[in-house]
Amino acid sequence: MKNMIDKITEFRDERGWGPFHNEKDLAISISLEASELLENFQWKSSEEAVSATRQNIKEEMADILIYLLQLADKMEIDLEEEVFKKMEKNALKYPVHQK
């Protein structure tokens, strides 16, 4: 994940976009890109959407991850660590039911 963050930061800094990438605007951008992802599925079944717009879906997913990683980096959050913590919390909240 560190390698991705470094590449994204390098790309951003080469273009002078850093000053515009504050927490609020990165969070807004995540939401906007998620909406663009949803547009691929509007009025279609999952199968139709994936078949017709798979490449665009992949690109929108990448956009979301790029902004999310930038936000995490800006806020000094280790997303990998937070994912594992959240999974532990979810395991307690939603235990596997034994038969």
Image (cartoon, rainbow, N blue to C red):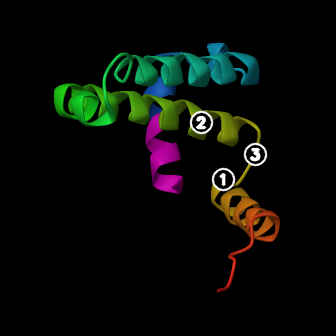
Q: Between tags 3 and 2, which lies in front?
A: 2
Mark with earlier residue (3, 2)? 2
Q: Are marks 1 and 3 in contact (CB under 8 Å)?
A: no
Q: Position of residue 80 (x, y in %)?
A: 63, 60
Kindly tell me whether residue 75 is visible in this rendering. yes
Q: How many marks?
A: 3
Residue in view at x 68 percent, y 76 percent: 96
Residue in view at x 18 percent, y 33 percent: 51
Secondary-structure class at tag 3: loop
Residue in view at x 66 percent, y 15 percent: 19
Type of amino acid at the residue the image marks with label 1: Leu
Q: What residue is pinned by disc 2?
A: 68
Q: What residue is pinned by disc 3?
A: 76
| Residue range (magenta) | 1-8
Secondary-structure class at tag 1: helix
Q: Is residue 52 left or right of residue 83?
A: left
